[in-house]
Image (cartoon, rainbow, N blue to C red):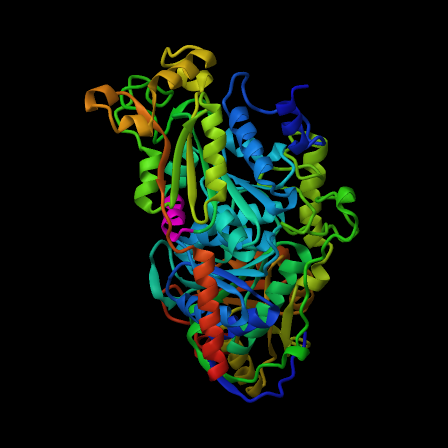
Amino acid sequence: MTIKGKKKPRLLQGNEAVVEGALAAGCSFFAGYPITPASEISEILAYRLPQVGGTFIQMEDEIASLGAVIGASLAGAKSMTATSGPGFSLMQENLGFACVAEVPCVIVNVMRGGPSTGLPTNPSQGDVMQARWGTHGDHPIIVLAPSSVHDSFEITVQAFNFSERYRTPVILLSDEVVAHTRETVTLPEPDEIEVWDRIRPSMPPEWYIPYEDTSRGVPPMGIFGDGYRYHVTGLIHDVRGFPTARADEIEPFMQRIHRKISQHFHDIQIVKHYMTNDAEIVVIAYGSVARSARRAVLDAREKGIKAGLLQLVTLYPFPRREVVGTIRNSRVVLVPEMNMGQISREVKRVNEGMTRVATLNRIDGGMITPQQIYEWIIKE
Amino acid sequence: MAEITKLVHKYLRHDKKFPHVWCPGCGNGIVLGAMIRAIDRLGYSKDEIVMVSGIGCSGRLPVYVDFNTLHTTHGRALTFATGVKLAKPELKVIVVMGDGDATAIGGNHFIHAARRNINITAIIINNNIYGMTGGQYSPTTPYGMKATTAPYRHIEHAFNIAELAVTAGAVFVGRGTVYHARLLDRLIEKALLKRGFGVVEIITHCHTQYGRRNRMGDAVAMMNWQKEHAVRIERAADMSEEELKDKFTIGVLVDRDLPIYTEQYNLVRKQAQEQASRQ
């Protein structure tokens, strides 16, 4: 998706841009619970949603928030919640429900330092593995990471689009630096934004088989009240939505919900290349760290060092093909992260000895600066 | 086939693989029948009903009926229902929960849904035990009784679900039993008609997990227990404390009017839009 702006530039915070992106994508329902550093998203939507005929509600906790979001989505509303680490932990239960019942929704996690109450006002990228594997059982998931205010807008729209197109929860993994940085951005006009809606059934209701396989693996979605009465459950179910314990029904179901993501990797896996073509030193980064890395790479190029940046926008499904293709001809790969090494494990996993993978980790509550990455590149 | 059975069949899902999961003699079927009779009498269409449940024996109830049905996670049924109702207020949202579901794991959601006065009907089937998982004590297991997790005796005190609902702000609270089937029909009907958060607590028996362990006999004996221990609330007013010992009241505990969430939120929308148009 490319966005060209015609409108007046605005000074926005990352969290505000998430709100703008959500509204541009057609979000009409938000349920959340206060938490730093995500509360601005709730506050602004409490003000904005009723203006456009939407609904905001502050629930009693994050478990309830995601429950309400799923309920609203089943009734046809594009729905979202926003939280940070401790709240995201509480959401894992209903996140699994949304995966299994295939309910589109967007969950924003503005990452702060963890574990537990951790560092409420400091940035971190410690929730990457939780975003992928936090809810129990094998499940497909889409995780996207914005790195700037403009990204926060664009990728929020993308998150809604993926959730609707693939009938899946999408996690927007922002961080405290991205969320609270204010910068001037020019947002696109509504007609410049591509918005996707879920595919609804078009056959007569008596012919509707709610979880039947399709060529895309994504069944059309009936909405409560529109005549397609069906059963929604967190139990593993047959094509009609009814609980099953039959191996010949469980296996195809589990395969399909994974296949609907894996057969669309080309669409879902978004990366951005900065001078990686001839790069001997490749930096792989995401979120606010990707911006520091970009500066460091530009500085290194000025010194004549062949450095490049591969920015991961999609963290999961992990963009293996792009990563392998980019690091194949490099001398060394650096994965800087504000955690003990989470995406670097994925890079090492797909590397299979092609090149050397180094890590640069920061867990003291501070952000990774361009200088830190630059110094590492210079030493190499 | 009796007329009453014919009516229930009209609302069952015939493509679902019966038999159901409940034990012979279970009261859940009586609850389901009462709900269907109330829905039928009030003339709701199948498309406008959304039936939501949590986890447990009660959680399986919606799968058998031909409405929009939603079987959620344990204790969270009211949160999902809140989202459905707010996104599409024209739908009639009915939530079925068990005692553990609604007042242990979902206790927080229960009191907040009541406080918010969201226009939902909550049916709570209270059998004093966790039946599906094998007879562990629940928040309504009485003091001194036995459960698989209280093999000696239970030392906690039970919640009074209906009183809890009254205190939390529900605008309609009724209590019935599966023995008093006609009263149950009327209570559910009243709760469905009530504008706001309506609660019906239904005392039922779990002879398999609770009655057997506590020597209360079979399903029939336990229904007789309900008959002997239930007192109409109208009659209870004239009875002494001594007479009411070991008894529980049935009937309408509360019927009052408070502003409804969805209507209030419509006013918020109007205010927001007026303010925005002035800017």
At x 47% / y 57%, what residue is drawn?
A: B262
Instruction: Say left or right for B246 vs A336.
Output: left
Instruction: Say left or right for A178 vs A350.
Output: left
Rendered position, A365 above or below B110: below
Count up the numbered dots: 0
In this view, the residue in front, A4 or A65, is: A65
The quadrant in which residue B37 appears is top right
Magenta: main secondary structure equals helix
The quadrant in which residue B8 appears is top right
At x 69% / y 37%, what residue is drawn?
A: A238
Is residue B126 on the magenta stretch?
no
At x 55% / y 64%, what residue is drawn?
A: A28
Instruction: Say left or right for A166 vs A370.
Output: right
* Residue A156 x/y as whole percent: 57, 68
At x 40% / y 46%, what residue is drawn?
A: B109
Q: Is residue A312 visible?
A: no
In this view, the residue in front, B167 or B70, is: B167
Q: Is residue B205 visible?
A: yes
The residue stretch that appears in magenta: B108-117
* Residue A39 x/y as whole percent: 40, 66
In this view, the residue in front, A95 or A274, is: A95
* Residue B219 x/y as whole percent: 47, 14
Question: What quarter of the picture does the N terminus of chain A occupy?
Answer: bottom right
In this view, the residue in front, A42 or A334, is: A42
Rendered position, B13 above or below B193: above
* Residue A333 x/y as whole percent: 57, 67
